[in-house]
Amino acid sequence: MEVYACAECGFEQDLASAETVPTAIVDGVGDVVALVAGAGPAVHGRRAPGVWSPLEYACHLRDALLVQRERVLMARRIEQPVFDPMGRDERVDHDGYADQNPDDVTRQLADAAAMFANVLRRLGSADWDRTVVYGYPERRVRSLRWVAAHTLHEVRHHRRDIEDQLANEDG
Ligand SMILES: [Zn+2]
């Protein structure tokens, strides 16, 4: 059994049941949307230098979902594509994450999750085993099962990051 696991947040996903990932992504993003929408002005501002604000995390997650969607679509039409980095840090400035309207971002985030989930749900059993060259955390050949699990992990791990930032506000 091949499991995607993160020791830091406790996330585990059996790659054999990657078909459950699209629904889990939509549900997980629903939780993030509720957190951000319910936080009011606390979505703005970094609690520590170098740690993104809740709004910046939400923007990152939206962009990650859109990038992963394009990557999965590419993997269906090209044999083992090699992905360039998404530029997670550059986008914070290039897309002006901190200046975006939280209402827009939560709406876009929910749409991005639905759009990515739709592409995943259209994968047949052989498609899930198509491979890509993925650069993070190290350059390796990965299946689309892994790409889906990795993206669900992004959702869960960043939910935790946002919760930590919001908890920090009270402390
Ligand atoms: Zn994690």
Image: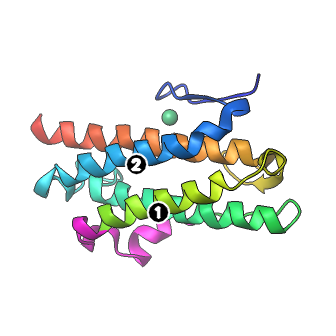
Magenta part of the protein: which range? Answer: 87-104
| Left or right: 113 as drawn, with respect to 116 | left
Instruction: Work out how far the residue at label 1 is from the one at label 2, CA to CA, in angstroms.
Output: 9 Å
Q: Mark 1 is on which residue type? A: Ala
| Between 73 and 56, the one nearer to me in the picture | 73
Quadrant including the C terminus: top left
| Left or right: 63 as drawn, with respect to 128 | left
Which residue, as the protein is rendered here, is positioned at the far right?
Answer: 79
| Left or right: 143 as drawn, with respect to 8 | right
For the residue carrying disc 1, how many other residues have a C-alpha within 10 Å: few (<14), some (14-19), or many (20+)?
many
Residue beneath the point at 67% across and 38% down = 18
Query: Residue 137 at what x, y percent from top left?
Result: 66, 45
Quadrant including the N terminus: top right
Residue beneath the point at 63% across and 52% down = 121
Q: Which residue is mark 1?
A: 112
**Residue 166 marker:** none
Query: Residue 167 at what x, y percent from top left?
Result: 19, 36
Residue 72 falls within the magenta-colored stretch = no
Q: Are marks 1 and 2 in contact (CB under 8 Å)?
A: yes
Sequence-wise, the earlier of marks 1 and 2 is 2
Asked if residue 151 is positioned above or below residue 5 in the image, the reply reads below
Q: Quadrant of residue 135?
A: bottom right
**Residue 29 marker:** 2
SS for dot 2: helix
| Between 27 and 122, the one nearer to me in the picture | 122
